[in-house]
C-alpha cells in the first residue's frame, strides 16, 4: 500500500458492528442483519470494517469476520439443528436447585464450531474481529482479537467467549488461559469496539451499529428482594440483571452521539432464558428481529450511508 493509499484509508470513516450476547436470542439480530443485507444489496462483511461480539454475539462476529459469511449463511449456522447440538448432554435435572456441574458439557458446541472453523487461526481473519472473555485465574477481562493473536484459533475464541457460567465449562485456550463468557464484563461490547477500532484504524471517525438480544423488563418486587438469598435471586434472573447494564450504551451515546445506533427492545413474549430453543420461542425471537427492522432499519441505513 502506497503512502497516499494509507493516508486515505486512515481518513475514511470506519464502521463497527457490535453484537450482544444472549444465547438463542441472538437470532433476532441475525434476522435484522438479513433485512439489512437485502436493503444494502451488499454483504455485511463488505460494509463493516470491524466486528466485535460477546458470547453468542461473539460467535456471530467470528462467523462474519473470519468466514466471511453473508447473513443467510449466518442464519443457517444458527439453525435449529446446530442450536440443539450446542445444548447436547445436559447434566441438569429438575429434581434439585443445587446443580454441581455446568448445564451442558460443551462437546456439542465444540463440534458445531469445529465443523465451520476447523483449525483456522484468529490472526488469519480477513476482517478485524474481537470477542470478549474473562480470565478466571487472572481475574480480569480479556479480548481475543485477530490483530493481537498468535496461535489462538477461531474455534477456541468462539468456545471461550460463549462459555457462559452455569451453562458451559470454563474454556482452556491455546496459551493456557482459562476463560469464561465475556458477558460477565460487557454483554454490550460496543464501547470496547469503538475504542479498539479507533486504535486500530488511527481515527476517531468511527460509526457503530450495536445489536442487542432483548431486555428483560419484568418488574422485580423491591421489598421482597430485600429478603432473597442465592436461590431466590437465581429464580429472578440475577444473571440477566448482571448482563443488562446500559452503562456502555450511555457512555458511547455521550461520546459519539448520532454516529452510534443501538438496536434493542424489551423481550416481550420471548423467554428470558438463553437456552429456550422451543419452536414457539424461536419464532417469537425472529418476530422480534423483524420488529427491530421496522423500527430501526431506516436509521441503520442512514448510519451506514452517512
Image (cartoon, grey):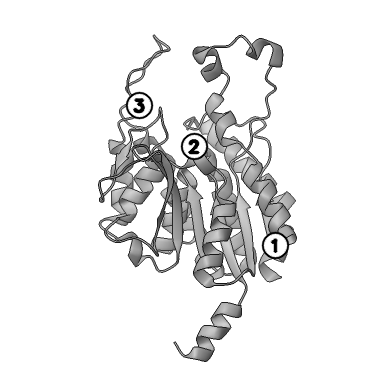
- From the image, tell me which residue sits under label 3: 102
Residue that carries the numbered disc 1 in the rendered image: 259
Residue visible at 25% across and 57% down? 119
- Disc 1/disc 2 C-alpha distance (Å): 26 Å
Q: Which residue is mark 2?
A: 184
Whether the residues at callouts 1 and 2 have beta carbons within 8 Å, the answer is no
CA distance separating discs 1 and 3: 40 Å
- Left or right: 35 in relation to 273: right
Residue 193 tag number: none
- Few, some or many C-alpha atoms within 10 Å of disc 2 (few <14, some 14-19, many ≥20)? many
Secondary structure of residue under mark 3? loop
Separation of residues labelled 2 and 3 (CA atoms): 16 Å
Q: Nearer the viewer, residue 165 or 192?
A: 192
Q: Position of residue 165 (x, y in %)?
A: 41, 31
The image shows residue 292 at horizontal and vertical percentages of 68, 47
Confirm or deny contact between disc 2 and disc 3 (CB under 8 A). Answer: no
The spot of residue 272 in percent (x, y) is: 57, 29
Amino acid at each position: 500500500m502506497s503512502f497516499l493509499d494509507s493516508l486515505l484509508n486512515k481518513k475514511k470513516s470506519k464502521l463497527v458492528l457490535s453484537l450482544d450476547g444472549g444465547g438463542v436470542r441472538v437470532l433476532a439480530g441475525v434476522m435484522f442483519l438479513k433485512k439489512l443485507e437485502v436493503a444494502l444489496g451488499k454483504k455485511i462483511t463488505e460494509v463493516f470494517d470491524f466486528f466485535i461480539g460477546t458470547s453468542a454475539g461473539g460467535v456471530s462476529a467470528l462467523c462474519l469476520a473470519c468466514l466471511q459469511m453473508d447473513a443467510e449463511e449466518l442464519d443457517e449456522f444458527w439453525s435449529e439443528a446446530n442450536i440443539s447440538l450446542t445444548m447436547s448432554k445436559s447434566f441438569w435435572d429438575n429434581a434439585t436447585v443445587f446443580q454441581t456441574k455446568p448445564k451442558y458439557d460443551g462437546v456439542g458446541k465444540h463440534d458445531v464450531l469445529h465443523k465451520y472453523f476447523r483449525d483456522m487461526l484468529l490472526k488469519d481473519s480477513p476482517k478485524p474481529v474481537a470477542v470478549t472473555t474473562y480470565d478466571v485465574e487472572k481475574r480480569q477481562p480479556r479480548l481475543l482479537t485477530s490483530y493481537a493473536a498468535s496461535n489462538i484459533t477461531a474455534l477456541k475464541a468462539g468456545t471461550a467467549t460463549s462459555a457462559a457460567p452455569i451453562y458451559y465449562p470454563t474454556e482452556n485456550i491455546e496459551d493456557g488461559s482459562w476463560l469464561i463468557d465475556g458477558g460477565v464484563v460487557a454483554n454490550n461490547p460496543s464501547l470496547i469496539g469503538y475504542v479498539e477500532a479507533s486504535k486500530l484504524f488511527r481515527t476517531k471517525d468511527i460509526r457503530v451499529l450495536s445489536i442487542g438480544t432483548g431486555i428483560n423488563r419484568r418488574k422485580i418486587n423491591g421489598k421482597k428482594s430485600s429478603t432473597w438469598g442465592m436461590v431466590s435471586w437465581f429464580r429472578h434472573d440475577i444473571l440477566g440483571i448482571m448482563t443488562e447494564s446500559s452503562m456502555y450504551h450511555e457512555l458511547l451515546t455521550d461520546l459519539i452521539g448520532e454516529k452510534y445506533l443501538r438496536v434493542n427492545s424489551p423481550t416481550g413474549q420471548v423467554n428470558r432464558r438463553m437456552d429456550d430453543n422451543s419452536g414457539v420461542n424461536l419464532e417469537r425471537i425472529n418476530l422480534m428481529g423483524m420488529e427491530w427492522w421496522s423500527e430501526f432499519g431506516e436509521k441503520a441505513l442512514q448510519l451506514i450511508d452517512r
